Image (cartoon, grey):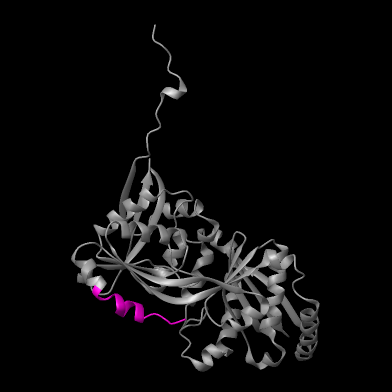
């Protein structure tokens, strides 16, 4: 009679990992994004597809699977002359350019990714991304272990508001609320004040036009050629206006809008990723600047977010003055990475290290 095997007699085999490269954007990106940390779950198929449609490029996707379950999805697009073999991670610049990987993905999977990447490109530009970004940090470590030249340049410091701590410390202060009521009273002398909040569907149904109208009157149009505006036709409007076509991204998009007598006067636009709010853009009509409409709207936006139990606001880079006044503190640095595959490309990459670093910003 055959002796029955006990559970202890079985050995758990390590997962079988493989990298698969496909032309275009893989539908598996959404599966990986859904299994990623909350802060990365906006890195969906449509996020990358919208960027390609707005900015151009032909993508390939490198997937790393364990027992046929996708753990990592890295979209790449060629940049520069074809002979150079340089690729970049596509996507929107705000809040950052990264790629999704499932929570708990082992380091070995990123080693498989680095090997597959080295078989297809000479170098990869990745960024801007935050220090501590789970996907970028793991790929950088795997690339270093395989002898890649790894170069970074500093972009900026981020600023974070701990809303959970603020909620327990009496934020906003009564003195701030009194000042805000004073400004609101005088702002109302210009007309009826209408405060509203919109998701991606409402933005698609006319909300984006209101945001663009404010941008066209703001400093960004007056002092620049307007190419950095987020929602105008001459700026990045094509990218942002395409995102709500994905219903999941539509629920993550959030805008606060102030109208004065029906005229858009100020806005704040965010991406809500779980309990984390990425503050992507805000602006106001300078005709109302005396009464601080942007500040008034943002305080209302934060109070509304606290009511929905958002715990952190990530303001990204940029002017830290008003952010510190509201209560933000310096967060992780934001960097641009250049990974150059082993061999002659890495030797050349190390020679260009100083030039790449100097092309960034100084603290």
Q: How many marks?
A: 0
The quarter of the picture where residue 58 lies is bottom left
Residue 160 in the image, given as x and y percentages of width and height: 59, 71
Residue 141 in the image, given as x and y percentages of width and height: 37, 58
Left or right, 257 with reference to 252 = right
Res 23 visible: no
Give the vertical position of 25 relative to 296 (above or below).
above
Q: Foreground: 6 or 128? A: 6
Res 229 visible: yes
Left or right, 59 with reference to 177 = left
Give the vertical position of 162 relative to 182 (above or below).
above
Residue 184 in the image, given as x and y percentages of width and height: 77, 85
Q: Is residue 354 magenta?
A: yes
The quarter of the picture where residue 21 lies is bottom left
The quarter of the picture where residue 265 lies is bottom right
Left or right, 132 with reference to 209 = left
Q: Residue at x 18, y 66 (%)?
A: 344
Q: Foreground: 329 or 243? A: 329
Please state the extent of the stretch shown in magenta in the rendering: 351-363
Residue 9 in the image, given as x and y percentages of width and height: 41, 22
Q: Is residue 155 magenta?
A: no
Q: Residue at x 45, y 19 (%)?
A: 6
């Amino acid at each position: 009679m055959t002796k029955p095997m006990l559970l202890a007699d079985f050995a758990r085999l390590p997962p079988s990992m493989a990298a698969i490269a496909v032309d275009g954007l893989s539908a598996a990106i959404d599966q990986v994004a859904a299994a990623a940390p909350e802060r990365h779950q906006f890195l969906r198929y449509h996020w990358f597809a919208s960027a390609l449609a707005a900015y151009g490029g032909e993508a390939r996707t490198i997937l790393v699977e364990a027992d046929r379950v996708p753990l990592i999805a890295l979209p790449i697009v060629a940049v520069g002359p074809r002979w150079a073999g340089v690729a970049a991670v596509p996507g929107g610049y705000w809040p950052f350019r990264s790629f999704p990987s499932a929570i708990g993905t082992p380091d070995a999977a990123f080693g498989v990714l680095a090997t597959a990447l080295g078989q297809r490109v000479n170098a990869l530009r990745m960024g801007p991304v935050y220090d501590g970004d789970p996907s970028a940090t793991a790929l950088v470590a795997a690339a270093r272990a395989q002898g890649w030249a790894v170069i970074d340049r500093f972009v900026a410091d981020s600023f974070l508001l701990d809303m959970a701590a603020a909620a327990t410390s009496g934020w906003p202060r009564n003195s701030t609320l009194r000042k805000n009521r004073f400004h609101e009273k005088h702002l109302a002398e210009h007309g009826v004040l209408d405060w509203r909040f919109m998701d991606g569907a409402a933005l698609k149904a006319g909300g984006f036009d209101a945001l663009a109208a404010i941008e066209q009157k703001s400093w960004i149009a007056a002092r620049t050629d307007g190419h950095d505006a987020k929602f105008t036709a001459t700026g990045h409007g094509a990218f942002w206006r395409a995102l709500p076509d994905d219903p999941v991204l539509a629920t993550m998009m959030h805008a606060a809008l102030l109208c004065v007598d029906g005229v858009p006067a100020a806005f704040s636009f965010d991406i809500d990723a779980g309990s984390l709010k990425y503050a992507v853009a805000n602006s106001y009509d300078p005709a109302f600047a005396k009464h601080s409409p942007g500040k008034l709207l943002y305080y209302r936006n934060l109070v509304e977010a606290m009511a929905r139990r958002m715990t952190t606001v990530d303001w990204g880079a940029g002017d830290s003055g008003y952010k510190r006044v509201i209560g933000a503190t310096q967060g992780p640095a934001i960097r641009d990475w250049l990974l150059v595959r082993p061999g002659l490309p890495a030797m050349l990459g190390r020679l260009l290290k100083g030039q790449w670093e100097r092309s960034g910003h100084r603290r």
